Image: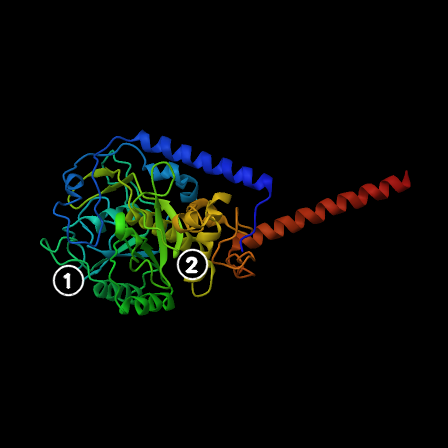
Amino acid sequence: MMSALRPGQQAGCRRATRALAVRVSRAAGALALTVVMLGGTASPALADDPFEACKQSQSENPNWPTVYTQLGLAAALRQSVGAGITVAVVDSGVDATNPHLSASVVDGVDLVGSSDGKTDTYGLGTAVAAIIAARQAAGSSSKLQGVAPRAQIMPVRVYENVDEQKGKPIDMAKTAQGIIWAADRGAKVIVVPHWSTTNHESLAGAIAHARSKGASVVVAAGDATGDEANADHYPAHTDGAFTVAALDANGLPAAVSVKNAKVKISAPGGPADTTAPGAGDCQITEPSTSFAAAYVAGVAALVAAKYNPLIPGGITPDDLENRLMTSASRSSAIQEVDAISSYGWGVVSPYEALNYTGQPPGPNNPEAPTDVLPPVVIPDPVPDDLPETRILVAAILGATAAVGACFWLWGKRRKRA
């Protein structure tokens, strides 16, 4: 059973939630860029390319991404930029020639074709990669930048198009193979922004393997409406997956975001500032759990980059995910069952995740014990291998001794007087 908040805490959470919604709404109205509808479904029924408008954009966005305001990313980026962390995008490939991604993309693999994963004829993989690690293009006025702009992107191509008439479609067996491939090559965060209502027996083993290698597998909850919204979506429903739900521009659960008891956390699903294969900047206004998963994967990279060097063996998937969940922004309203399946632990909060040290704000997670989860432990003592550190310590000790001597002499003089 979840513990209730005290009245003052409830009021504070409600104010914080309203403020977040206002910030999200204002930020959503601040940009007016190319608009494209996102399909993002495993169904082969889509006849039109949902990224077509985005692919034709050659514009340069002079504004910072909307999510920077929504999630307070500027403060988080002062502490971590994702350096040293590899994020594998297991999807349709990534266009490595895009100027926002050319410096971020490392060697990958194509499990459905003959490329090295650095090609994308559909668009979702590139869009997700840009949300995570886009860099500002040299000589451009564009301010498009990812959540973790110094993280590296490992492209793992596991399908060509959601429309089987245009290429090899989504196959969860290939997705599982891609997760294993990425984990075996050092990816710390693996994001799967696609889904299917058809499970494959290899998914659970692939995710377990990735976790054993130290990688968190961040997945989209799935986009669906009608009868399909009640179906289990994979890998979101697979044990070990870090499932992400989507919020709309008002900070409320997106209508297309599949409600799932396995949801761990939520994030903005749109508008999403990104790019596409062979394109400039664009904004996709329709929310999707694909983009929500990308935002969470980027925040995971920020946290991993900060704590990986401080922990022998690196931060574990459990520690990384606990940090993201316990620091998430949530109100007492999330205690309701429907809200839990829509928000999980709450809305991802980058700055709080980087600085979490103890009691999380808001109610306890419904899936976890009521005890506060322990923060990541940093080894102590830190090796004293810097001359500057020794000089500083000596100076402090010397100053302390001098002050002490002054007080001793002053006391002696008072007694004589």
Q: Is residue 128 left or right of residue 113?
A: right
Q: Quadrant of the C terminus?
A: top right
- What is the spatial separation of the Cα atoms under label 2 and label 1, in whole angstroms? 33 Å
The amino acid type of the residue labelled 1 equals: Val
Residue 42 vertical placement versus 49 (above, below): below
Question: Of marks 2 and 1, which one's residue comes earlier in the chain?
Answer: 1
Camera-side residue: 357 or 19?
19
Marking on residue 112? 1
* Residue 104 in view, yes or no: no
Q: Residue furthest front?
A: 227
**How many numbered marks, from 0 up?**
2
Within 10 angstroms of label 2, few (less than 14), some, or many (20 or more) residues?
some
* Residue 74 in view, yes or no: yes
Residue of label 2 = 308
For the residue labelled by badge 1, is the local secondary structure a helix, a strand or a loop?
A: loop
Q: Quadrant of the N terminus?
A: bottom right
Residue 252 vertical placement versus 97 (above, below): above
For the residue labelled by badge 2, is the local secondary structure a helix, a strand or a loop?
A: helix
Which residue is rendered at x = 53% and y = 57% of the image? 373
Q: Position of residue 240 (x, y in %)?
A: 37, 63
Q: Position of residue 345 (x, y in %)?
A: 45, 51
Q: Position of residue 50 (x, y in %)?
A: 17, 44
Within 10 angstroms of label 1, few (less than 14), some, or many (20 or more) residues?
some
